[in-house]
Image: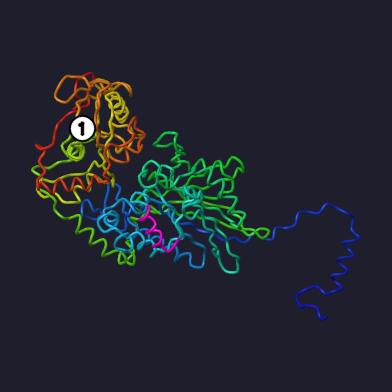
């Protein structure tokens, strides 16, 4: 054999080997490094809580969306960011997931659930159109996916070009998952590399059992998210998943807005801490911005990466994973996450085109005039003062329930009503009031129900509601912007009509209702008095964990409160506070009104 012109001859090799064999035995020095191992990477793009936002549009103002932080909204904005990153990473592994609450939240979504429901028309839901253009890899079902009933949810899922996941939603009749629990996606990390098998587990929120009891009771149960993750992570590993990602519709605080009767509402950090084998969790539900959070798993010591991308399409989560191939297995050596702001890009024209006709039809609908208001009515002060616009809601609810109970065993009971200040910006202008103005006041798709409460239950309910306010000592300044406890959202503070009461914000929580009397009198409400109370289905089902309200309804006609408000205004043609405003509550300190 002719030796290589650049290499040693066969004789040189033999001589060198013999010399080495004759040399005295010494401890060998470590071999010189051959260089860093080859790395690949995987990127996860995550969205959550898009809530029916496709266009960067505020249907309540009939204008481009804007807020004090110059945020933009909408899936069309998300699409542009996603497409940019996919283009940058062409040939590399990129996944796109959503963590739920997709088909409820805007007049656009409501229109195709209520005015022209997709279950009747067969039309494709606007959120299916938009997300199919983007080509998501999977979506997790959020609790708001159940708001319009299971037939509409099923229709929407069948319209998607990708899987909808919810491992802990169980069919009561069969004891099996009602939806797909997980998928394992094969993705190519780049040239000449074997595929990476990515397991994606979807977990939905147990609170659905309360919030949408009318739709799911007896049909679905919602198991603990932590226990469900512990069940499925080993299964996905056994079935070949190299990487485990969870898409969870639940916050990371470890607390719930309801009591202990259901599994935890916000257990994401607990899942990371307690369930071994998870690499990262995309989560939603709390509408918070969590760019990057690491949680140490107690069993393995591994760092689990968490991220939550705000709400409505304002942010996109980007998670990046560095991978190496070791002993025939993929291993993550580095991971990080960040949030991208959608106000940095324009809307994707393909998404806009896919939904344009539905958007335009919704805009035309919400701009229909329903009545004329004699004066401007604003919700700006409704949290801390009795205002006509909140009394408008309570008046319509009271009138509806009273009419329905006429001639029944409950006809002789006084009817009270409860309403929450859902919006701080809602306004009925003087003059024409449009559907969008009413929808801006009542932003949720709640239905009206009624129950019977005793006087002692009404007092307990009011005491619980009054926890909304911070303690303000007599004489101390009161700033309306900071009057409330930030731990209690506006939608979990209720004002009653039909009784007169004072809330003393100088007193401790639980001792604040210092005056509770029959309307227009000084007669205290007796503990044993009986009242019919009009209430929305969210609250009556246990939302907010208010005491005494979860009981059998005496009225439940499945009528949407927003539509009842629209119908009332249309029937009368005029909205005049003189017809419904009855000031009946106030904030005080030692009997002195705060405002």
Q: Residue at x 31, y 54 (%)?
A: 72
Residue closest to the eye, 472 or 102: 102
User: Quadrant of residue 217 in the image?
Assistant: top left
Residue closest to the eye, 303 or 516: 516
Q: Is residue 154 magenta?
A: yes
According to the image, what is the colour scheme of the structure?
Answer: rainbow
Q: Which residue is mark 1?
A: 415
Expressed as whole percent of the image width and height from the top left, the position of residue 467 reads 32, 28
Q: Is residue 275 left or right of residue 118?
A: right
Residue closest to the eye, 337 or 269: 269
Expressed as whole percent of the image width and height from the top left, the position of residue 74 reads 33, 56
| Crowd class of label 1 (few under 14; some 14 to 19; many from 20; radius 10 Å) | many
User: Quadrant of residue 466 in the image?
Assistant: top left
Q: Residue at x 57, y 55 (%)?
A: 243
User: Quadrant of residue 594 in the image?
Assistant: top left
Expressed as whole percent of the image width and height from the top left, the position of residue 291 reads 44, 48
Expressed as whole percent of the image width and height from the top left, the position of residue 452 reads 28, 31
Q: Is residue 444 left or right of residue 194?
A: left
Q: Is residue 380 visible?
A: no
Q: Is residue 298 magenta?
A: no
Q: Residue at x 87, y 61 (%)?
A: 20
């Amino acid at each position: 054999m002719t030796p290589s012109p650049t290499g040693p001859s066969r004789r040189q090799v033999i001589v060198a080997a013999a010399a080495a064999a004759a040399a005295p035995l010494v401890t060998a020095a470590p071999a010189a490094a051959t260089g860093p191992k080859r790395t690949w990477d995987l990127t996860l793009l995550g969205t959550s809580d898009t809530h029916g936002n496709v266009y960067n549009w505020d249907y309540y103002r009939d204008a481009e969306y804007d807020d004090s932080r110059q945020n933009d909204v909408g899936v069309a904005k998300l699409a542009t960011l996603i497409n940019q990153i996919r283009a940058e990473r062409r040939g590399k592994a990129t996944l796109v997931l959503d963590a739920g609450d997709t088909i409820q939240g805007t007049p656009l979504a409501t229109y195709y659930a209520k005015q022209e429901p997709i279950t009747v028309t067969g039309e494709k839901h606007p959120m299916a159109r938009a997300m199919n253009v983007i080509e998501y890899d999977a979506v997790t079902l959020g609790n708001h996916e159940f708001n319009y009933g299971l037939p509409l949810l099923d229709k929407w899922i069948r319209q998607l070009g990708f899987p909808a996941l919810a491992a802990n939603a169980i069919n009561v009749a069969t004891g099996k998952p009602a939806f797909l629990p997980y998928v394992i996606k094969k993705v190519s990390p780049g040239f000449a590399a074997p595929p990476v098998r990515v397991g994606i587990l979807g977990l939905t929120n147990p609170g659905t059992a309360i919030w949408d009891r009318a739709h799911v009771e007896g049909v679905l149960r919602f198991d603990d998210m932590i226990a469900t993750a512990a069940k499925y992570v080993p299964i996905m590993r056994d079935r070949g998943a190299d990487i485990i990602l969870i898409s969870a519709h639940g916050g990371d605080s470890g607390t719930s807005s309801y009591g202990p009767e259901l599994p935890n509402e916000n257990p994401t950090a607990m899942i990371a801490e307690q369930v071994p084998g998870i690499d990262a969790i995309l989560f939603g539900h709390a509408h918070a911005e969590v760019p990057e959070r690491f949680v140490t798993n107690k069993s393995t010591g591994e760092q689990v990466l968490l991220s939550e991308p705000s709400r409505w399409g304002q942010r996109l989560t980007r998670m990046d994973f560095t991978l190496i191939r070791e002993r025939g297995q993929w291993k993550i050596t580095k991971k990080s996450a960040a949030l991208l702001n959608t106000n940095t890009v324009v809307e994707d024209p393909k998404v806009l085109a896919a939904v344009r006709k539905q958007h335009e039809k919704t805009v035309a609908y919400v701009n229909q005039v329903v009545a004329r208001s004699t004066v401007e009515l604003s919700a700006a002060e409704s949290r801390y003062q009795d205002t006509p616009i909140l009394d408008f809601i309570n008046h319509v609810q009271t009138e509806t329930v009273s009419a329905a109970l006429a001639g029944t065993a409950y006809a002789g009971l006084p009817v009270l009503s409860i309403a929450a200040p859902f919006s701080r910006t809602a306004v009925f202008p003087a003059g024409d009031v449009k559907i969008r103005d009413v929808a801006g006041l009542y932003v949720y798709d709640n239905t009206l129900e009624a129950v019977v409460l005793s006087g002692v239950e009404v007092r307990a309910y009011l005491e619980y509601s009054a926890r909304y306010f911070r303690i303000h000592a007599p004489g101390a300044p009161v700033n309306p912007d900071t009057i409330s406890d930030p731990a209690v959202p506006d939608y979990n503070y209720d004002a009653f009509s039909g009784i007169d009461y004072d809330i003393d914000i100088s007193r401790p929580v639980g001792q604040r209702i210092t005056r509770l009397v029959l309307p227009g009198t000084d007669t205290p409400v007796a503990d044993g008095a009986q009242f019919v109370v009009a209430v929305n289905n969210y609250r009556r089902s246990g939302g907010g964990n208010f005491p005494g309200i979860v009981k059998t309804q005496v009225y439940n006609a499945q009528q949407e409160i927003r539509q009842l408000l629209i119908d009332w205004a249309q029937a009368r043609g005029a909205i005049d506070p003189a017809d419904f405003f009855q000031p009946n509550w106030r904030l005080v300190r030692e009997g002195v009104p705060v405002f």
